[in-house]
Image: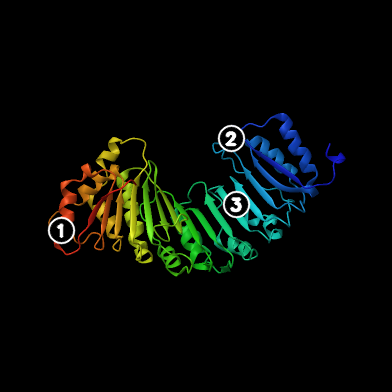
Amino acid sequence: MLEHFPPLPLIIDHVDRSDFIATEDEEGIMLALRHHHRVRRIRLSMPVSNLQKVLEALDNEFPILEWLYIRPPVDQNMSLTLPKLFRAPQLRHLKLSNFAFPVGSPLLTTATGLVTLSLDDTSPFVYSHPNDLFRRLSQMPQLEILGIAFHYPSPNREVKRELLRRPLTTRVILPNLRWFGFKGASAYLEALLPCMTAPFLAKLQVMFFDQRTFHLPHLLQFLSTAENLSFGSATLIFWEGWISAIVYPNKDARVYAFYMDIVCRGVDRQVASAAQIFRVLRPAFSAMENLTLEYQWYGLSSEWRNGAHRTRWRALLRSFSNVKTLRVDSALVSQLSRSLELEDGESHVELLPQLKELSYPNLREFGDAFTAFIDACRIAGRPVTVVRRRI
């Protein structure tokens, strides 16, 4: 049928959340791919068995292809690979999920005009050395969006061992990069950041897997020196399996400047991880004036009622010494109340020394510990206004 139509550009788009593709749809896709010189856009999400057939049909040059998006179902994490002869010299947007890390692919050698490069859920055993990655990125001066996400973490010790064996020698300048996202081992990110210059970066998003310790000096330096990143307001969200920290330029902003997820279970572990990271990053967030604490678990589990140890909460609050407005979800009031109960040698005044306003959804949950905290602030000459406000 295609032979009888004018040679217009072809768009192949099949994203089915049911993870099913009809035989006639698959046949239509394969037919269109045979006209590789006319395909401008490919967006596919389908079972791995079907994708493998499609990948075989990509073993050719696609001279006008501008957009390529391929993602298998979430529960089918078999690692896919790009065919060796696949070329797309006009490619602008490349988003692959569950692929073996394709840094060595000839595609990235020819697609030097990329604006978007997103490699999601990459196979865990193929962490590419940063030198190899940066050599490819240095050939992509137009890159605006870069995302690298590993499906599972390679242990930090393995990443460090490889970096000691083969030190970094490559630096890369990405003059147009606006958004950078990373998911994986913190040691790999720490290796990338000091060798990467992105003068106009406006959004940084990171996701760390569960770790006992976080050593992030280069992340701190990167955040502190990024000219276009400013931090005035933060929201910490406690989920059942992770904690999110969303940092905005100011309290009215709707687009974040920094977004961090930490995958860990248990309230005590979540608060401890957040406290450890924000203690390290504290200098970068010294101007932050607004803090919101939210709870997004499904129901109040017994684990949540037990909560985090009071010292962990106090450590977390100390990282926000310039906060003037604190908003607290009702499910967190009892948690914070316990953290404000004093022990020998402790003082209320050391926590949130610049606080001016404290917001609750429900003032009836305002406990004795909070009352004592408010009174201590008043006596110290810095009265705190209590406001009922929905989070």
| Towards the viewer: 250 or 216 | 250
Q: Quadrant of the N terminus?
A: top right
Q: Amino acid at mark 2?
A: Arg
Given contact means CB atoms under 8 Å apart, are the residues at marks 3 and 2 in contact? no
Residue drawn at x 71%, y 42% is 12
Q: Residues within 10 Å of mark 3 (few under 14, many from 20)?
A: many
The correct choice, above or below, for 204 with respect to 294 in the image is below
Q: Is residue 337 left or right of residue 197?
A: left
Q: Is residue 341 visible?
A: no
Q: CA distance from mark 3 to mark 2?
A: 25 Å
Where on the picture, by quarter, is residue 48?
A: top right
Residue drawn at x 36%, y 55% is 213
Task: Look at the numbered disc 3 and give the secondary structure of its residue.
Answer: loop
Residue drawn at x 16%, y 60% is 378
Q: Is residue 260 left or right of residue 170?
A: left
Q: Residues within 10 Å of mark 1 (few under 14, many from 20)?
A: some
The correct choice, above or below, for 221 with respect to 95 in the image is below
Residue 286 placement (x, y as % from top left) = 34, 66
- Between disc 3 and disc 2, whose residue precedes? 2
Task: Look at the numbered disc 1 and give the secondary structure of its residue.
Answer: helix
Q: Is residue 142 visible?
A: yes
Check disc 2 and report the residue beneath it: 17
Q: CA distance from mark 1 to mark 2?
A: 55 Å
Of tags 1 and 2, the one toward the viewer is 1
Label for residue 376? 1
Q: Amino acid at mark 3?
A: Phe
Q: Residues within 10 Å of mark 2 (few under 14, many from 20)?
A: few
Label for residue 101? 3
- Between disc 1 and disc 2, whose residue precedes? 2
